Amino acid sequence: MLCKRIIPCLDVKDGRVVKGTNFVNLVDAGSPIELAARYSNESADELVFLDITASAEKRKTLVHLVEEVAKVLRIPFTVGGGISELDDIDALLKAGADKVSLNSAIVKNPNLISEAARQFGSQAIVAAIDVKHTGNEYKVFIKGGREETDLIGIEWCKQAAELGAGEILLTSMDKDGTKSGYDIKFLKELTSAVTIPVIASGGAGKKEDFLEAFNEADVDACLAASLFHYNILPIKELKEYLDASGVIVRI
Amino acid sequence: MIAVINYGAGNVASVANALAELKQDYIITDNEFEICDANKVIFPGVGEASFAVKQLHKLNLFTVLRIVKKPMLGICLGLQLMADFSEEGNVTCLGIFPGRSIKFDNKLVKVPHMGWNSMEIVKDSKLFNGIKNGERFYFAHSYYLPETEYTTALSNNNVKFTAAMEKNNYYGVQFHPEKSGDAGLQLIKNFVML
């Protein structure tokens, strides 16, 4: 049977990890390579690198980072953050990334999903969608949550799936950073509305939150950042808990 | 020397990285003479089947892959392209193995089949040396090859499908050994040692 996945997320800037510098047990907390190796040893199932570099050299540094990470990492990884062109996707996949996650660019140009899926395969294209509860509905936000769009969360997720995205990485902005659990209500609606895998993001604070997302919302993977970064919840401990609770995970 | 086929439809970087870790000499190539000169051939593949077959024809590699006598390992789409036919784009493939690749039913399971799944060994293979039955590997695909007489391992995604197969000098794995941690690296090592 297919395992449920646990995915640590690393924020990188100018080729260095920017979160996690307070992590005490790391020799070089700023090295994506070392963090990647550590997570891989701790039985993470995949990694996500979110690039927040704003410089003109962005693409070059990101491609270089992917090349270096791919040399040492023997598990799949996704790269996201400001990717907007087919050429960028091509360069990142050729450098050794397994998937790219697309966010603001596909809101502006939904056809980028279908073009990228046709060229690289759906399995390489992750639609990263940020939603926030406003009024009576969930609206889609872009540019790292700074800009509200007219799109309704669930509708945009369905459209992204129909256009050929291979997965949805759903971040609840209401939950992000609160450590109060994933947005089960929205995720539940989402997993019944689409037939592609869903990755839950935003809100993880304890082991039970993961179990709830897998059992109640039927998500396929759970993503978290600080919880793993600062070793508040070691991945091994989380997986043993999930395994004992009847969730199929790779230990 | 191991030839890694580069036909614009595969993540060759990760395969090359795995070979480098195993300290193997390899060449990334789309040249049929270099393929014929190699001791072994790795045929990776991601993406869409009919596009990939078109690329093989365009690069004049279709025939050489059918007649190569060296050990050849197809990975993911590479495995599917070694069968008779793929319903992804309805395309005739290399025909080394019998069978047609068909799509998972998204009414029954989520598609793509993405993540770590276990492999049930049904026939002995040198590829599985040091790998335990039930070991987990990383998969990322929407189409699959049903079980054939050459299937050596099965996986289950609501339906059982070919996870690995073998016929003479030809080998195929549906999962990505280059992305499957230590067990995956062991499998590549086993292929290299054939």
Image (cartoon, coloured by chain):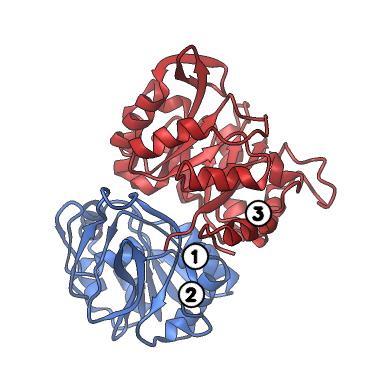
Chain colours: A red, B blue
Within 10 Å of disc 2 (Cα), the crowding (few <14, some 14-19, many 20+) is many
Say whether residue B74 is visible: no
Q: Chain of mark 3?
A: A
- CB of mark 3 within 8 Å of CB of mark 2? no
Vertical arrangement, residue B29 with respect to residue A77, above or below: below
Q: Amino acid at mark 1?
A: Glu
Q: Residue furthest right?
A: A24
- CB of mark 1 within 8 Å of CB of mark 2? yes
Q: Disc 1 designates what residue?
A: B178
Q: Chain of mark 2?
A: B
Residue A216, image x and y in percent?
48, 43
Residue A46, image x and y in percent?
55, 52
Within 10 Å of disc 3 (Cα), the crowding (few <14, some 14-19, many 20+) is some
Q: Residue at x 14, y 55 (%)?
A: B90
Using the rendered image, report if marks 3 and 2 lie on a common chain: no
Judged from the image, the secondary structure of the residue bearing numbered disc 3 is: helix
Distance from the alpha carbon under mark 3 to that under mark 2: 30 Å
Q: Disc 2 designates what residue?
A: B188
Q: Disc 3 designates what residue?
A: A238
Judged from the image, the secondary structure of the residue bearing numbered disc 2 is: helix
